Image (cartoon, rainbow, N blue to C red):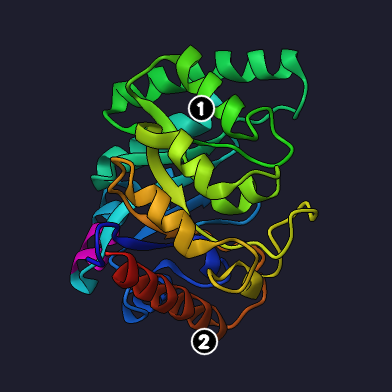
Amino acid sequence: MTARFPLACNTVLFRDHPLRDALEAIAWAGFDGAELAFISGMVEHVSPEMGDSGLAEVRAMAADLGLRLFSIEVTPNVPDRVAQACALAAALGIPVVAIGSGGKTGDEASLVEAIDLGRTLAEIAGRHGVRLALKPHVGAAVFDTATARRAHAEIGSPHLGLNFDPSHLHRVPEDVAAAATAFGDLVAHSHFRDCPSRVERGPGTPAQQVPGNGEVDIPGVLRALAATTYAGPLSFECIGAAGYSLAHATALAAGTRGYLARCLQEIA
């Protein structure tokens, strides 16, 4: 484990490659663990169709590689789909399922609807003994610190926390270090990547999402996050790597792990 935060990589970076190859690459890059992608339209490295034997194989692969399984990311955030993700997480011994809110930024009715849905999803998570991590997302009903804190308070469930993602908060735009302080004890998970600009809708190319390659003050954000009680993983969630070779994706993962490990050593 590096400093206080273990380092993880989301398998969505390896969207064109089998789970075994993804986990091997994540382990060889030096990560402490992995986040498994169950993302409609991108990749489903785990799914209900795997059955008990398939999920046992996933657990064995991770154990053989010395990787912890920290979380599952699921889209879309509809009850049946989230229930599937929570069941997968419970079967794999994974404590956290990462979700978004859906909806539309700046629309009060959309935010109220997203909060109502959040209550339903949190109840589902509770039945499976896992916790949801709700991420503020550019363009969604929950998109910034204020809407995230409001949603958390109004959902009011111990089975839902927040997902702290610097790349989305940077594009609000917000002071991301100040946002880390404001998220405080509410953080249940962290998708951790950089971003090249405050004005782009997307987070940039995969290379620009590697921490240290964009505009976000990564060391400053890590210092602020370390001042909270959060001690969970920093999970590199890199999107847009369709068509990337295994070597190319692994290089991005290794660069991320190396940079974050060095930053965490510096702030320890």
Give the CA separation, mark 2 to mark 1.
Answer: 35 Å
Say if 133 sits above or below 150 in the image.
below
Looking at the rendering, which quadrant does residue 117 occupy?
top right
User: Which residue type does callout 2 highlight?
Assistant: Ala
Residue at point 30% right, 52% down? 55
In this view, which residue lies farthest toward the bottom?
A: 247
Q: Quadrant of the N terminus?
A: bottom left
Label disc, if present, on residue 26 of the rendered structure: none
Whether 59 is among the magenta residues is yes
Relative to 266, is 48 on the left or the right? right
Q: Residue 77: x, y in percent?
A: 57, 32
Q: Residue 259: x, y in percent?
A: 43, 76
Q: Which residue is mark 1?
A: 80
Looking at the rendering, which quadrant does residue 126 occupy?
top left
Task: Give the magenta-colored segment's residue range.
Answer: 57-63
Q: Residue 31: x, y in percent?
A: 33, 70
Relative to 37, is 207 on the left or the right? right
Q: Quadrant of the C terminus?
A: bottom left
Asked whether residue 20 is in view, the answer is: no
Label disc, if present, on residue 247 of the rendered structure: 2
Q: Residues within 10 Å of mark 2 (few under 14, many from 20)?
A: few
The kind of secondary structure element at disc 1 is helix
